[in-house]
Amino acid sequence: MTPISALRMASPLDNASYTRLSERGGSAGAAGSVQLVQAGALDKAQAQAPPTASVVWLSQAPERAVPADNTYEQLQPFTVTTVSKADTLASAMPKPSGAEKTWASSPAGDAISTLMARNYGTTPRDRDNLANQWRGLGSALLSKLSAATTEPVDFRQTMLVGIDPTQSLDDQFSNLQRKAATVTLQIKTRSGQTVDLQIAVNNQPRLPNASANPGIQVAVSSSGALSDAERQALVTLSDGLEEALAGLGQSESPTMDLAGLMNYDRSVFSGLSLDIVNPTASAAVGAFSLRLGEHENTLAFKGTAGQIDLRLDVTPPLSADNAQQRQAALAQQLQLIDAAAERGHADAALVDLFKSSFTQMHQAAASSEGRAVGVLGMSPALPGPGFTEQAQPLLSGLTDFEASFSGDFTRNNRWNSVTEKGHVEYEISQKTEVQTDPRKDTASIVQEQSEQLKSQYAKARNEGMLDISSGNFDRYRIQDRRTVTTLLEAAKDRLTNAVQKTDQTQSHTHETLVNNRVQERRETPDEQHFLKSLQ
């Protein structure tokens, strides 16, 4: 076999052969490359095999004559590249050095440090799911406050995964929160103390000269010593925090599991807030905010599915409690949301998140009834229980609220190609106003429930694949508005007037575009008005 024939084969190389190939030099008759694979990344059989050589030959220059034995006098030196992992053979990126975990303070085997080390995960897939990295840390941090002490609590720990030898260690610890997904919980007690908890997880890949450092950082503190009741209430709250983080930390389909968190002990705590911020552009939950207070509760969500905003009063307009009426009213509101979502083609995942949040927020408001007095109960000038008893069944039974969602949506055809694409916005609310005239011993209640839907989308014809740039598709616009106003009037502790007015408008526009020009336009308006007596 001639030398050229031997080199054209990817044959095993021993060390002596590799040395001889590397030392060859001379004219540019040929060029090649040798890739050596670290055996540790391959399976056992591959690990025992010697490295191989792959040679790529350049075309022979026309003016040069090929020797009679079809060989060249000399070979070009070979370039040797070491690949660190079997699954990254296509690149020659070296394995990052220093993958060990580095701690800001000695962990000494405590439960929180053990959880941090375990939760960070060993693969990128593990780290994509924040629920895995948050698991157990919230309750473990709150348990730090459960021990009886006369001093404020202040615990912090930071774990870096790999360090950059070109940067100072202090800078790397302080830079961990940059581009980190951060959980912040704050609780205010009725005695005036404040409890703060934070979990920061940085999953950003380590890059040269990067300002962010991968790892986990946790902290929990109290502004002062906590009472036995406060410590016990924190322990009880820990399960609710874990449930909330487990749902919101899902990488693909986040859920709202907030009941345990919202059912905090209001006799001990005056307020609670939970914030989540994830700067990753593709994060299922980019931002989340929950505020629970004595007068109102709010929730805000922003992620790949869309945006959600809710605000609810803590107490209903009437202090009287009717659980059956409240559940019936809540079911009716959910039916309205479903109908609007179907008409507007809203994304199912966004609607499910909205309905779940809406339901849990109303249930939390209901659980706080009896601890505060409703609108009517706050005014001694209003008529007595006779009017309250008559008015209660004529109102919704829900606390006043404002709620909305918005987001983009797509739908696929049977061949899994996008056939429809659009944007939807939906708002629903309730507002109750009370007016009194003590001199005349009269009162009136006006409760307004309204909803508004806006949706626009483009759709391919004949279930085809949507191509906006072609200018050939159908365009739809939907605008709905509905308002139900209930008016109750009373004099001398008796209901004198009760009417309900409904105003509803719907507009559906369909345009057929051909070559970016509207060839046909059809608009279907609908307007209805109703007035009925409730007596």
Image (tube, rainbow, N blue to C red):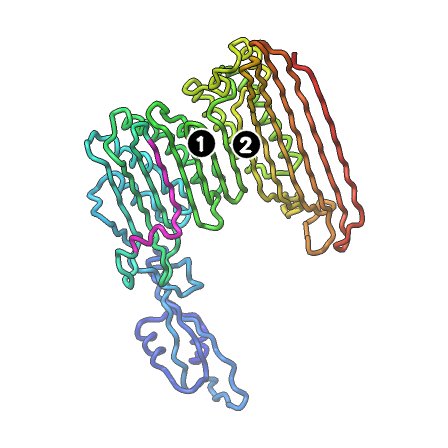
Q: Are marks 1 and 2 in contact (CB under 8 Å)?
A: no
Question: In the image, which is nearer the foreground, mark 1 or mark 2?
Answer: 2
Q: Amino acid at mark 2?
A: Glu
Q: Position of residue 299 (x, y in %)?
A: 47, 35
Foreground of the two, 416 or 220: 220
Q: Say what secondary structure mark 2 lies in.
A: strand
The relative height of residue 448 versus residue 130 in the rendered view (above or below) is above
The relative height of residue 522 versus residue 24 in the rendered view (above or below) is above
Q: Position of residue 75 (x, y in %)?
A: 41, 82
Q: Is residue 316 left or right of residue 86?
A: right
Q: Say what secondary structure mark 1 lies in.
A: loop
Residue sitting at x 53%, y 38%: 308
Q: Which residues are magenta?
A: 172-188
Q: Quadrant of residue 260?
A: top left
Q: Is residue 423 left or right of residue 90?
A: right
Residue at mark 2: 402
Foreground of the two, 87 or 217: 217
Residue at mark 1: 257
Residue sitting at x 45%, y 81%: 30
